[in-house]
Image (spheres, grey):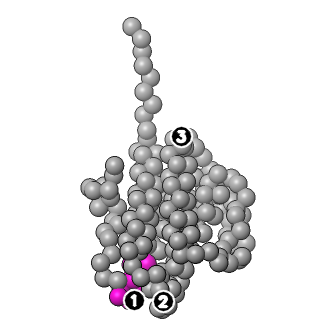
Amino acid sequence: MTQTTVKETSALEGLVKSFASYNRWANTTLVNWLKQKPAELMDKEVASSFPSICLTLIHIWDTERFWLSVLKREPAPPSFRMVGFDGSLEEVYEGIVKHSEQLETYIHSLSDEEVQERVAFYSPWAEGNEPRFEYLLQVLNHSTYHRGQVVTIGRNVGLTDAPMTDYNFYLLYGRS
């Protein structure tokens, strides 16, 4: 009789992997909605921490790029805040979706031990040394926060039919 070893996933590992998939789904859902709207509304400015939908999307993408480099213990790419971004709106849409997929793939590749491993980082504005899952939750929660701002900015420029991107909605209807 042959014994089969089944790897059990810890609740923590399962949670961060589920949340990474949710983040990819929510970013993709938001981008697909925005692609159906007039492009000129993406640059219309309102009072917010980032004054337009496009600038908020660039910030989400830029921050996910930074944190993925921290998580992988790689040098951070040059921040769009420092070097600017002069690409097209379509490149922003494509970049945020592709990067969310890369982040999801990376997080899904981690073992439970790697999820709990401490990761140190240093940047001009902060430094830390926490378990990797803390930074995973940081980046994923940060994106959720700013997706909410995109919806609010959208309402201020006349977009009133935003898709539901709540985590529970993902659990009920978004998982494939």
In the picture, the disc for residue 44 is 2
Q: Is residue 113 left or right of residue 126?
A: left
Q: Amino acid at mark 2?
A: Lys
What residue lies at 35% left-to-right and 83% top-to-bottom?
Answer: 159
Q: SS class of the residue under badge 2? A: loop
Which is the main secondary structure of the residues drawn in magenta? helix
Q: SS class of the residue under badge 3? A: loop
Residue 37, position as x, y percentages in the image? 39, 79
118 relative to 166, above or below: above
What residue lies at 55% left-to-right and 80% top-to-bottom?
Answer: 55
What's the CA distance linking mark 2 and mark 1?
Answer: 7 Å
Q: Is residue 176 left or right of residue 109?
A: left
Residue 168, position as x, y percentages in the image? 30, 60
Q: Are marks 3 and 2 in contact (CB under 8 Å)?
A: no
Residue designated by label 3? 111
Mark 1, Cα crowd under 10 Å, few <14 / some 14-19 / many 20+, is: some
Q: Amino acid at mark 1?
A: Val
Q: Earlier in the sequence, mark 1 or mark 3?
A: 3
94 relative to 15, above or below: below
Residue 79, position as x, y percentages in the image? 68, 71
In magenta segment, residue 169? no
Q: Amino acid at mark 3?
A: Ser
What's the CA distance linking mark 3 and mark 2?
Answer: 43 Å
Q: Are marks 2 and 1 in contact (CB under 8 Å)?
A: yes
| Image quadrant in which you'd find residue 124 | bottom right
| Image quadrant in which you'd find residue 63 | bottom right
In the picture, the disc for residue 157 is 1
